Image (tube, coloured by chain):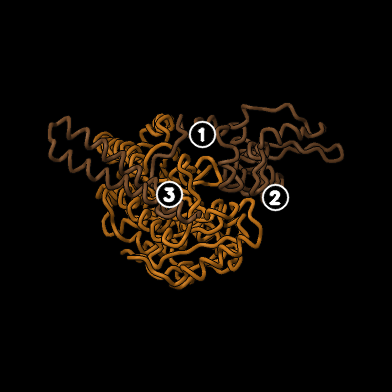
Chain colours: A orange, B brown
Amino acid sequence: MSLERVMNEAISPWMKEEGPDSDIVLSSRVRLARNFEDIPFPILADEEDLTRIIDYFQQEYAQQSFESYQDLELIRMKDLKDVEKRVLVEKHLISPHLSDHANYGGVLISENEQVSIMVNEEDHMRIQLYVPGYQLEKALNEASKLDDWLEENINYAFDEERGYLTSCPTNVGTGLRASVMMHLPALVMTQQMNRLVPAINQLGLVVRGIYGEGSEALGNIFQISNQITLGKSEKDIVEDLKSVVHQLIEHERTARDRIIGQTGVQLEDKIFRSYGVLSNSRIIESKEAAKCLSDLRLGIDLGYIKNVSKTILNELMILTQPGFLQQYAQKSLTPEERDVRRASLIRERLQLEN
Amino acid sequence: MECQECHQRPATLHFTQVINGNKTEVHVCEKCAYEKGYMSQNQDSFSLHNLLSGLFNFETYPMSESQTPNYSYSTQQGLKCEKCGLTYQEFTRIGKFGCAECYRTFGEKLNPIFRRVHSGNTRHDGKIPVRTGGNLQIRKQIDDKRQEMQRLIHEENFEEAAKVRDQIRSLQEQINSDISDDRDGDE
């Protein structure tokens, strides 16, 4: 796998496949936090320990394959330019924490970019696995197999009472964070989302924007994940998340139907206006771009717009982030320059579709 | 109000700067606040960690920095991790464990914290690793089999129940032989 390709292609190969309920659930993810038994966690480990760990992954796992996850490539944070790290964050392959704070950090990425194993983040290992659409069980099973594969050689920090031991008390037990990325434009339009978020929180789940903690729900994309990791089995955690996601899917579908019934041509007008903005603007801010892309995607899902591929939302949301724009331009850009670049990139991309 | 630096995002932070008696007002978004140095990164970690440690710190100890450290207290309570050197107090401040041993060192004291974070739970009930899980995996299997046996008995399916009973026995033997293996090794 070439680093170049990872850097230049906005959507990972797996995103091009369509999963179940992919009109609403863009992707499902499972993350497992794991640590070595005898080494202090990265927050207190010394240089020597951290170097030993990253070297170990280089020796044992770089260029290795596990089932359909081929050719793991180890990328060390210290070898990357800031803009390259930003691209990996925008593609959700690494966390902002790994990018900004982990001097001895690295990441193993599989050829299809479905698997990324962060090394020396807050924990020694953060195993991440993505699948397209709504397939949380599949993500869990695959991540668990990957976990078993790593465990063949690694003694994990584990305690009978507390489970898998992690640096932060919020991850202890299963070390599992399961999440889905959902496109919920109709729930936002009908102002139901404001009401639903507190209710979801009360069930021990967290709702965030597309780029995690503290980020806005750009393009009506929401990330929903479990908060509790201790005292429940992996399966139950995923089941609890699923029951909420399932309801959200139903609510979103109902809201879409209702909007079509009530506003009909107005909705169609809104969608085509956004399409017009995307196809014609010369300057566009990220927020406006995200809003129009969300409309466009809704238009595709509802059948108003044909001949534009569904992955356009995922692709352009990532492609028009500051890191990617600068990687494309091969230089740093001021916000004003970015807005111009963003507009031209979107226009070019849409022209490819017709 | 939009951010005066990037003119893109809404201003979420509002400062009043006083330099040589000149008052200026600053309205910026969080991102620009860091980039332009209105806020240092330290304050960033401060806010997040404080949220977490605020959660843990319901047991506050009256110990200001000027006070001489109470050595007898820390030795008495054994509240310093032997392995990584993290004290319980530091743990509540940073909200992170330093190593696996911290969990054992701080032991029962962690229960109220876990209860708060994990809605009442303190014990793991999920996957068990093969290598470091000891015979926990087998013991869990035995528990599951016992439940199955009870169910079969309840259904008066005694033939199947007897089979399950035998499976439980052989699992128990496995544990026993593991223990005697360990003893052999010690000698």
Q: Are the residues flagged by discs 3 and 2 from a single subunit? A: yes
| Residue A159, numbered circle | none
Question: What residue sits right under mark 3 in the picture?
Answer: B133
N-term-proximal mark, 1 vs 2 = 2
Q: Quadrant of the N terminus of chain A?
A: bottom left
The residue nearer to you, when weighing A184 against A26, is A26
In percent of the image, x 38 and y 43: which residue is there? B126
| Residue B36, numbered circle | 2
Q: Are the residues flagged by discs 3 and 1 from a single subunit? A: yes
The residue nearer to you, when weighing A174 against A346, is A174
Total labels: the figure holds 3
**Real-space CA distance between mark 3 and mark 2, rounded to the nearest whole angstrom:** 50 Å
- Viewer-nearest of labels 3 and 1? 3
Residue B153 figure quarter: top left
Question: What residue sits right under mark 1 in the picture?
Answer: B114
Tell me which chain the residue with mark 3 is part of: B
- A63 relative to A39, above or below: below
